[in-house]
Amino acid sequence: MPVAAEVKHEVEVPDGVSVRYKDYILHVKGPKGELKREFIHDRVSLSVDGNKIIVYCALPKKKDYAIAGTWKAHINNMLKGVTEGFEYHLKILFAHFPMKVTVKGDRVVIENFLGERSPRYAKIHGDAKVEIKGDMVIVKSANKEHAGQTAANIERATRIKDRDPRVFQDGIYIVKKG
């Protein structure tokens, strides 16, 4: 792939969102919350110009080109998070033993999974909020990484080892992302 003479990504800032870039940290504030992230690199620069965020690199190498695209994706996720938020839906499935799922502090507690006496725990990452409604677990956050990691932690806490997965299909599984 031929690399361009320069990379310049412009990201539009939606109405109702304020953006500030100072000391290599981008602050984004909107109706769903406030996010901040560090963007520091030798060859790739970031600037805020009115209602645009500009990611720029002159004479990029392959890695610089990739980093500029990654920064653009992170900025888009931040802007979407503070305006719409991110939500993951997980379904609680059991056939053999009824599971009890609760939220205690910064952990999700899964009791009676496959009849086990000791509960299993899943860490709630960052500012994610976890709600349990019947057989659904809903994870919400303005930060995509916090919501996704929390959902993954809950799903992984009910991973089955040393049993036939065709028979023991109990667990908590991600059914919807967005």
Image: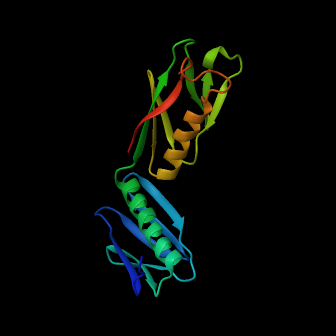
Residue extending furthest toward the left: 15
The image shows residue 33, relative to residue 43, as above or below, that is: above
Residue at x 68% of width, y 17% of height: 116
For residue 136, what is the image quadrant? Answer: top left
Residue 88 position (above or below residue 167): below
**In this view of the protein, which residue sits in the foreground, 59 or 38?**
59
Residue 130 visible from this viewpoint: yes
Residue 148 lies, in percent from the top left, at 50, 45
State whether residue 112 appears in this view. no
Which residue appears at 64% of the width and 14% of the height? 115
Q: In the picture shown, does residue 126 fall above or below 71?
A: above
| Left/right of residue 102 with respect to residue 48 in the rendered view | right
Say which residue appears at 37% left-offset and 56% top-offset: 80
Name the outermost residue toward the right.
Answer: 118
Considering only vertical position in the picture, is 39 above or below 115? below
Q: Number of marks in the image?
A: 0
Q: Nearer the viewer, residue 47 or 104?
A: 47
Q: Pick the quarter of the image with the C terminus.
A: top left
The residue located at (55%, 17%) in the rendering is 167
Q: Position of residue 159 (x, y in %)?
A: 61, 30
